[in-house]
Image: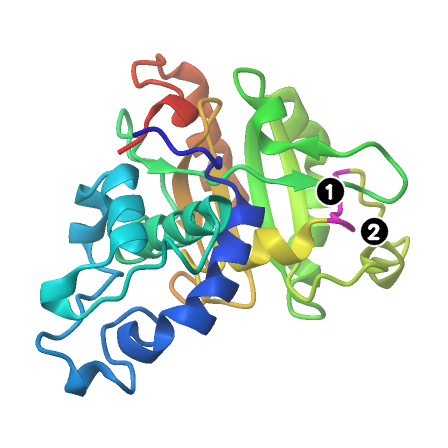
Amino acid sequence: MRPRVPYQAASIAQGARLYREHCAACHGRSGAGDGDRAATLPRRPPDLRSPHTAQHTAGDLFWWITGGIPRAAMPAFGDRLGAEARWDLVNFVRALGADTAARTLGPGVEPGRPWLVAPDFTFAVGPTPARALKDYRGRRIVLLVLYTLPDSRPRLAQLAANYNVLALLGVEVVAVPGDAAPDAIRRLGADPLILFPIVTEGAREIAAAYGLFARAPHAEFLIDRQGYVRARWAPETAPVRELNLLLADIQELNQEKAATPAADEHVH
């Protein structure tokens, strides 16, 4: 069964809200299977963050959410939630299931190994028309930066100073304020001059989705032209990320042949 709701940040964020309301009591707030009601169940809920979750198809997850799992005392939600809401839950669980695996991604690209699908997202910068991550598919690599002020300011300044080089290499930088501040551009000020997009609409959903892959005040995700996250960097795990290493990873992606189906076709 192919998902009826795309795997995108807005759906994941909505699924997270539904999960907290309907699922966390048993599955736990983080998905670890340690909710307040877990001990009362005939079997402990599985850890939804573990790799086994990704081994199930989206259709499997939708079926279980819809019909329940009687032997595990999991209730059916087919008569409680509409189909779109159930698909939102599926997308959240899919992202949650990628959590542990995503944390194995380091700051460097592993050549020829695209596997972590980047959730699509829609965003706007000020009054400009909305655009989506998919708009860059086949055209540009995207460096997605989740930032927090004031700690992220030096890194943003470094990226701004080298934006021309990044653009020449086929990279777009998309910066997302972790607090989803609508006045994010004003807060950054005019020095240094930042020419790459600073998200003012859609930031909350992007931060909610990608925050599952790196729970840190500052995190960067290098997304290839086919829509896969190929590298992940957070200062907590690797305090220094030299620009020359980032440029080397970009060159690696530029030289790589596209052998894996595009991310929106890669559905488990």
Q: Residue at x 35, y 57 (%)?
A: 96
- The disc labelled 1 sits on which kind of residue? Ala
Which residue position is annotated with label 2?
192
Tell me what residue is drawn at x 58 percent, y 57 percent: 207
Q: Which color scheme is applied?
A: rainbow
Q: Is residue 196 left or right of residue 8?
A: right
Magenta range is: 196-201
Q: Which residue is at the front of the view, 26 or 230?
A: 26
Quick one: quadrant of the C terminus?
top left
**In the structure shown, which secondary structural element does the residue marked by tag 2 occupy?**
loop
Q: Nearer the viewer, residue 164 or 263?
A: 263
Quadrant of image for the N terminus: top left
Q: Is residue 16 highlighted in magenta?
A: no
Left or right for 22, reference 259: right
Q: Position of residue 90 (x, y in %)?
A: 37, 49
From this viewpoint, which residue is outermost toward the front?
A: 79
Residue assigned mark 1 = 161
Q: Is residue 228 left or right of residue 62?
A: right
Tell me which residue sits at (29%, 60%) in the image: 76
Q: Nearer the viewer, residue 104 or 157?
A: 104
Q: Quadrant of residue 60?
A: top left
SS type, badge 1: helix
